[in-house]
Amino acid sequence: MAALISIVIPVYNEEGNLPHLYNELKGVLSKSKDPYEIIFVDDGSTDKSEAMIRQTAKSDSNVKGIIFRRNYGQTSAIAAGIDYSKGSYIMTMDADLQNDPQDIISLMQKIRDGYDLVSGWRRKRKEPFIKRRLPSLIANYIISASTGLKLHDYGCTLKAYRKDFLKNINLYGEMHRFMPLYVYWQGGKIAEVEVHHRERKWGNSKYGMNRMLKVIFDLITVKFLLGNYSTSPLYFFGGWGILLMVLGTLCGMFTLFQKFMWGFWVHRNPLLLLAVFLFILGTQIIFIGLLAELNIRIYYETTKKSVYTVKEEINC
Ligand code: UDP
Ligand code: MG
């Protein structure tokens, strides 16, 4: 059965790329049997992008346009595209032609094989090594190692998702690159496909090196909020808290041992300070964990969010 594919494209000042992008997309999609919709999200562009999107949406019923009031960032643009999409499959891609619309075919092929996420991998990236590929290599390694989902290219926007897995997800900051984790943590089947990557011919990249720092902070948030500790933060904080308290106690006991067995003067003994410091830190962390527990309960119970996701309901 043919299923609707929604192609979500965040656009920020891409007037030079849009006409080519649209033509290439049409070329590819007109050959496929599946119905499709292209959703351009204009993220507060100050060039002709907005007018172009309006124009295209007017003349082509398969094209939807969403125009933001101001620039909210790529993540918000992608989130809006997903919210407005009707398809059972969602594909995200950049508007700058660095992703090749031709690859849509292979991604869809894989999705049809039964995967819930097919992630593009720009194996031959057309970007400078030091400024782009190296930071990205490190980031992909850190994210893969700390989350357990090994992907070569978290940063590649070209990815295809089964819509079910993107329901109820909230994207903040720059978290679109962590969308695969939402699928992974819900138990989705994930595949990687090599995709082409092209140089940016028109316009400039919207990002600089400060992206690195944001990725790290986003990773901490995502891992904490969605990972194993999302419903039981005290397990995390409590573990560290207890560890520090035990270390503090050991230091304290050794100080006492020094005093009574070896007759040390301990009032200027750094070990005593360490004992006090570690013990206080340990108790503090445990109490922070309790506060986190409280927050988690407020979060789930006030938003009526469920702590689980259901794949199928039978005879219910
Ligand atoms: N983009 C956006 N809002 C922003 C920044 C970027 O919608 O605030 C879009 C941009 O138009 C492009 C995609 O996000 O379609 C990726 O941006 P860019 O090509 O600058 O990132 P890079 O490829 O350099 O990582
Ligand atoms: Mg780009």
Image: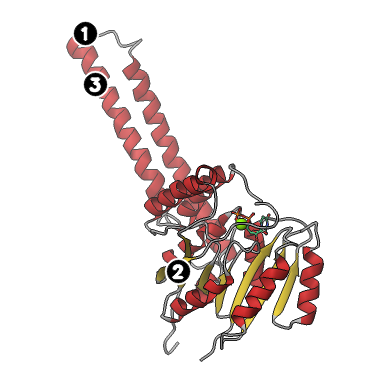
Q: Identify the residue position indicated by label 3 in the image.
A: 254
Under mark 3, the amino acid is: Phe
Secondary element at image label 1? loop
Report x, y in % for residue 288. 47, 42
* Amino acid type of the residue that numbered disc 2 sits on in the rendered structure: Tyr
Q: Residue at x 42, y 65 (%)?
A: 184
Counting other residues with Cα less than 10 Å from the Cα at mark 3, is it few (<14), some (14-19), or many (20 or more)?
some
Left/right placement of residue 14 relative to residue 99 reads right
Q: Which residue is mark 1?
A: 263
The answer to whether any part of residue 291 appears in the image is no
Residue type at mark 1? Gly
Q: For numbered disc 2, what is the local secondary structure?
A: loop
**Closer to viewer: mark 3 or mark 2:** 2
In the picture as drawn, the residue positioned furthest to the bottom comes out as: 1
Q: Position of residue 183 (x, y in %)?
A: 46, 67
Query: In this view of the protein, which residue sits in the foreground, 235 or 206?
Result: 206
| Residue depicted at x 77% and y 64% | 49
Query: Is 176 rendered above or below residue 29?
Result: above
Q: Nearer the viewer, residue 79 or 59?
A: 59
**Dots 2, 1 in contact, CB < 8 A:** no
- The C terminus, quarter of image: bottom left
> For the residues carrying marks 2 and 1, which lies nearer the camera in this image?
2
Q: Are marks 1 and 3 in contact (CB under 8 Å)?
A: no
Q: Earlier in the sequence, mark 2 or mark 1?
A: 1
Query: Which residue is labeled 2 in the image?
Result: 308
| Residue 130 in view here | yes
Any atom of ligand 1 within 8 Å of the CB at mark 2?
no
